[in-house]
Amino acid sequence: MLVDLTVRELLERVASGEPVPGGGSMAALCAALASGLAEMVARLTVGRRKDSALDHEMDQLIDRARTLRGDLTRAVDLDSDAYTKVMVAYRMPKTTGEEKRLRSEAIQEALKEAARVPLAVAEMAVDALELASLAVRKGNKNAVTDGLAGALMARSAVMAAAANVRVNLQGITDEAFVQKAQARTELLEKKALAAEEMIRSWAQPLVTGGG
């Protein structure tokens, strides 16, 4: 599994000439790291202000971020597995009419799965962005750049995952599936861009010393 590799090994694997792991898996990893940073800021916040309401909110953030981080970590391998199935489907024999039919069906199903996985990653990355937003807005101000880094990574993960959704939709003939996925992808991108703009406005005074 990719997630069991050392950081150095994973980087070498990504930089190799193999098609997997690619952008989809790295989008999931980026969002997982974003979740981890939001979780870290929350942990650095609990108990610092003697505010029980804030501590409760940060505890909830920690729980959500930990769960999300686990789901996104699993998605690192799920994305690579999905793309591998696409490649396997395209290599199926296509000599007879029956072989062509089976190959076409396999390709379509593999492409749908290869679109579903990054779409799910984009959904989770938006959630990670929301957690990072909360960490920046209410978390320990000494760790604001960590929360901001997480937010920016989550935003990038959304956009990268969305690109992977679209590239796989190009080969899918099910128009209803394509339209639904496209609409959801566009909505997630808009959410990510709006959230990024808001987070930057919150963080800027703190980062530049104006807050």
Image: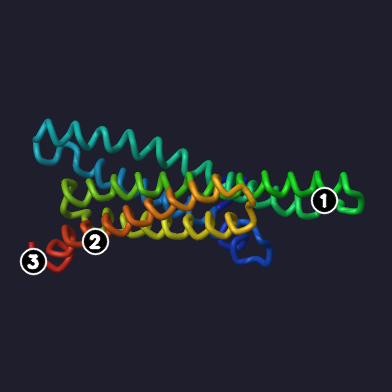
* Disc 1 residue crowd, few under 14, some 14–19, many 20+, Cα 10 Å: some
Mark 1: secondary structure: loop
Where is mark 1, residue-wise?
Answer: 92
At x 55%, y 45%, the residue is 177
Where is mark 3, residue-wise?
Answer: 210
Q: Which of 169/33 is in front?
A: 169
Which sits earlier in the primary sequence, circle 2 or circle 3?
2
Left or right: 142 in relation to 74:
left
- The disc placed on residue 197 is 2
Q: Position of residue 97 (x, y in %)?
A: 88, 48
Q: Does residue 193 sit above or below 107 in this rendering? A: below
What amino acid type is highlighted by mark number 2? Answer: Glu
What amino acid type is highlighted by mark number 3? Answer: Gly
* Disc 3 residue crowd, few under 14, some 14–19, many 20+, Cα 10 Å: few
Mark 2: secondary structure: helix
Image quadrant occupied by the N terminus: top right
Does the residue at mark 1 contact the one at mark 2 (Cβ under 8 Å)? Answer: no
What amino acid type is highlighted by mark number 1? Answer: Met
Which sits earlier in the primary sequence, circle 1 or circle 2?
1
Does the residue at mark 3 contact the one at mark 1 (Cβ under 8 Å)? Answer: no
Q: How far apart are marks 1 and 2 (CA)?
A: 46 Å
Q: Which of marks 2 and 3 is in front?
A: 2
Q: Nearer the viewer, mark 3 or mark 1?
A: 1
Q: Position of residue 167 (x, y in %)?
A: 57, 60
Which sits earlier in the primary sequence, circle 3 or circle 1?
1
Left or right: 56 in relation to 25:
left
* Disc 2 residue crowd, few under 14, some 14–19, many 20+, Cα 10 Å: few
Whether residue 83 is visible to the viewer of this picture, yes or no, is yes
Mark 3: secondary structure: loop
Q: Distance between the residues labelled 2 and 3?
A: 18 Å
At x 22%, y 37%, the residue is 58
Left or right: 100 in relation to 87:
right
